Amino acid sequence: DAGVIQSPRHEVTEMGQEVTLRCKPISGHNSLFWYRQTMMRGLELLIYFNNNVPIDDSGMPEDRFSAKMPNASFSTLKIQPSEPRDSAVYFCASSLDRGTSGRRNTGELFFGEGSRLTVL
Amino acid sequence: QKEVEQDPGPLSVPEGAIVSLNCTYSNSAFQYFMWYRQYSRKGPELLMYTYSSGNKEDGRFTAQVDKSSKYISLFIRDSQPSDSATYLCAMSEGAGNQFYFGTGTSLTVIP
């Protein structure tokens, strides 16, 4: 399995520009998470989806942030307009619901390699 | 108060030392406790997983959960330079898959 795939790995943009981060979860996983990581605040959950439906977006900082999951194999996180304080590493993670019938799993989160965003 | 508190370090130890990493939490409903390891410029990877209280051992790593004190620990025996990474604790309740992470402890093992 290729794991969780994120793109781009690095993005440098100017304040005010639109940024779109992409994620392909592990095939068969039914939960997808977007996290933001900074030195000051650590890993912060922005939003998570279950079966393509947004379940909790209370971590989305403001209306400039939006996330979509049009199908089970793709999700985007969009920032428009971007600001310097959005600079961080954005991680996508996927998991299979704990206790899913016929499978023994822990609900472990599998993370992508992250998208490092710098807004100038 | 954050749900999960973790000392960010940094922690620096000589090779072969025993390392103790800790987290405290406030939500008594947490039942699943995990330790993730994150190498520089990589995503976190699951290292240890424990359900409810007790100990779990895997090679040089031991995870302990004390639910009465709301305290979890990760011990690394005979630490190696390859253990140098950031260690994040994570917890979740029984229902749903929402995980709460500590801020991570940066560990350096010096050869």
Image (tube, helix red, strand yellow):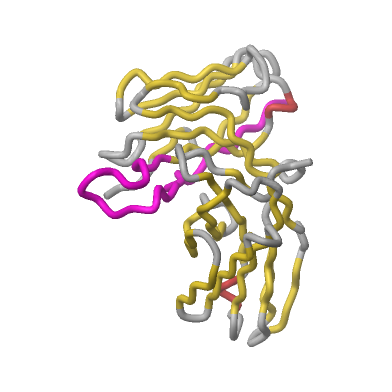
Q: Position of residue A71 (x, y in %)?
A: 30, 22
Q: Majority secondary structure of the magenta segment? A: loop
Q: Is residue A107 magenta?
A: yes
| Residue B82: quadrant of the picture | bottom right
Q: Position of residue B2 (x, y in %)?
A: 74, 42
Q: Is residue B98 magenta?
A: no
Location of residue A70 in the rendering, given as x and y in whole percent from the top left corner: 34, 18
Of A50 and A18, nearer the camera is A50
Quadrant of the drawing holding the N terminus of chain B: top right
Question: Where, by quadrant of the figure, is residue A17 drawn?
Answer: top right
State the residue in front, B63 or A74. B63
Left or right of A104: which side holds A55? Answer: right
- A118 to the left or right of B2: left
Residue at image x 66%, y 45%? B27
Does residue B37 lie above or below A73 as drawn?
below
Residue B94 spot, x, y in % from top left: 47, 45
> Does residue A93 appear left or right of residue B73 in this picture?
left
Eyeballing the image, is A81 above or below B6? above
Residue at the spot 49% in from the left edge and 20% down from the top edge: A67
In which quadrant is the C terminus of chain B drawn? bottom right
Q: Residue at x 20, y 48 (%)?
A: A102
Horizontal side of B71 relative to A112 (left or right) equals: right
Depth check, front residue: B68 or A7? B68
From this viewpoint, which residue is outermost toward the left? A102
Magenta residue span = A94-120
